[in-house]
């Protein structure tokens, strides 16, 4: 029987964008019930005694926002965690590292001064950086540190990087433009000094959650340097190291959340 976590979370939304991540995480759910809304299957289940709804959002901000809205309005989740791959933007963040967001941004929004908005400002919310829930952030960074120390994850990563994986904290920025050049990466770093990685969903989930008053956190596995210089086999990395890392993170996160 599912139970409320000590942190007050009764039902957790677990979101990933890619099939490989979803398949591995969903395999660890207890007695999932599939509810289809539009093109998405929402798996209502238990994990470590906590009620969860696990879903693959697909790629992009609109897909992620639609998914988060359904999780909140149709399934009544009272917290959301998003995980999956991202591109690192600084030299000290390498392939296989885990990045936990202290805040999310949307790097492709710019009203150019209209409505007194600066670049990156979210209309209605009047903020550029959307902070993660402090409680969920603390659980997430503890979980990420646990994952990068696990022998299973380190052994898988040896096929893709000679370096031991590490955990990091920083801003994660999202947009519907894929960042794949050093020029684009450096341009963002000039404006967001604490930027850690870029992806295409988390900032949209953050906006929906803030508008609904739902706590959220994002943790990403670094797959490349977001500069078009990908030396690894992305499909192989996604199917093995990235999906294993995401799954280990969710397992640790749910277990710690339930006892928090």
Image: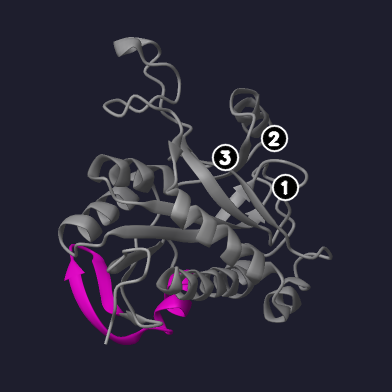
Looking at the rendering, the stretch of residues picked out in magenta corresponds to: 20-45
Q: Quarter of the image containing the C terminus?
A: bottom left
Counting labels gives 3
The mark found on residue 210 in the picture is none
Provide the residue designation for mark 3: 179
Left or right: residue 124 versus residue 7 is: left
Side of 77 relative to 165 (left or right): left
Q: Is residue 32 magenta?
A: yes
Tell me if residue 206 comes above or below residue 186 in the rendering. below
Measured as percent of width and height from the top left, residue 215 is found at 35, 51
Residue 171 showing in the rendered view: yes
- Image position of 95 with respect to 105: above or below: below
- Which residue is disc 1 drawn over? 229
Query: Image quadrant for the N terminus?
Result: bottom left
Q: What colouring does the structure picture have?
A: one colour
Mark 1: secondary structure = loop
Q: Earlier in the sequence, mark 1 or mark 3?
A: 3
Task: Please name whichever residue, 170 or 226, is drawn nearer the observer in this view of the structure.
Answer: 170
Quadrant assignment, res 149: bottom right
Q: CA distance from mark 1 to mark 3?
A: 11 Å
Q: Residue at x 70, y 53 (%)?
A: 230
Question: Residue drawn 45% across and 31% down?
Answer: 108
**CB atoms at circles 2 and 1 under 8 Å apart?**
yes
Crowding around mark 2 (Cα neighbors within 10 Å: few <14, some 14 to 19, many 20+) is some
- Asked if the stretch drawn in magenta spans residue 241, the answer is no
Helix, strand or loop at label 3? It is: loop
Q: Is residue 97 left or right of residue 27?
A: right
Label 2's element?
A: helix
């Amino acid at each position: 029987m599912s139970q409320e976590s000590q942190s007050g979370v009764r039902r957790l939304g677990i979101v990933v964008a890619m099939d490989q991540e979803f398949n591995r995480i969903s395999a660890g759910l207890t007695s999932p019930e599939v509810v289809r809304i539009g093109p998405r299957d929402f798996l209502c289940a238990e994990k470590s005694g906590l009620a969860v709804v696990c879903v693959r959002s697909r790629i992009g901000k609109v897909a992620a926002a639609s998914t988060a809205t359904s999780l909140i309005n149709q399934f009544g989740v009272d917290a959301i965690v998003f995980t999956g791959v991202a591109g690192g933007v600084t030299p000290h963040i390498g392939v296989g590292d885990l990045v936990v967001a202290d805040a999310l941004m949307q790097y492709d929004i710019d009203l150019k001064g209209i409505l007194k908005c600066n670049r990156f400002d979210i209309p209605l919310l009047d903020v550029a950086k959307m902070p993660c829930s402090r409680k969920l952030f603390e659980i997430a960074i503890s979980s990420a540190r646990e994952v990068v120390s696990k022998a299973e994850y380190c052994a898988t990563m040896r096929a893709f990087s000679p370096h031991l994986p590490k955990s990091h904290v920083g801003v994660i920025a999202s947009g519907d433009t894929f960042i794949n050049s050093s020029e684009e990466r450096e341009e963002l770093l000039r404006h967001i000094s604490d930027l850690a990685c870029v992806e295409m969903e988390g900032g949209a989930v953050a906006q929906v959650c803030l508008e609904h008053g739902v706590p959220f956190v994002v943790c990403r596995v670094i797959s490349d340097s977001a500069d078009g210089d990908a030396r690894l086999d992305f499909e192989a990395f996604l199917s093995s190291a990235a999906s294993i890392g995401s799954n280990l993170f969710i397992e640790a996160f749910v277990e710690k959340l339930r006892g928090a």
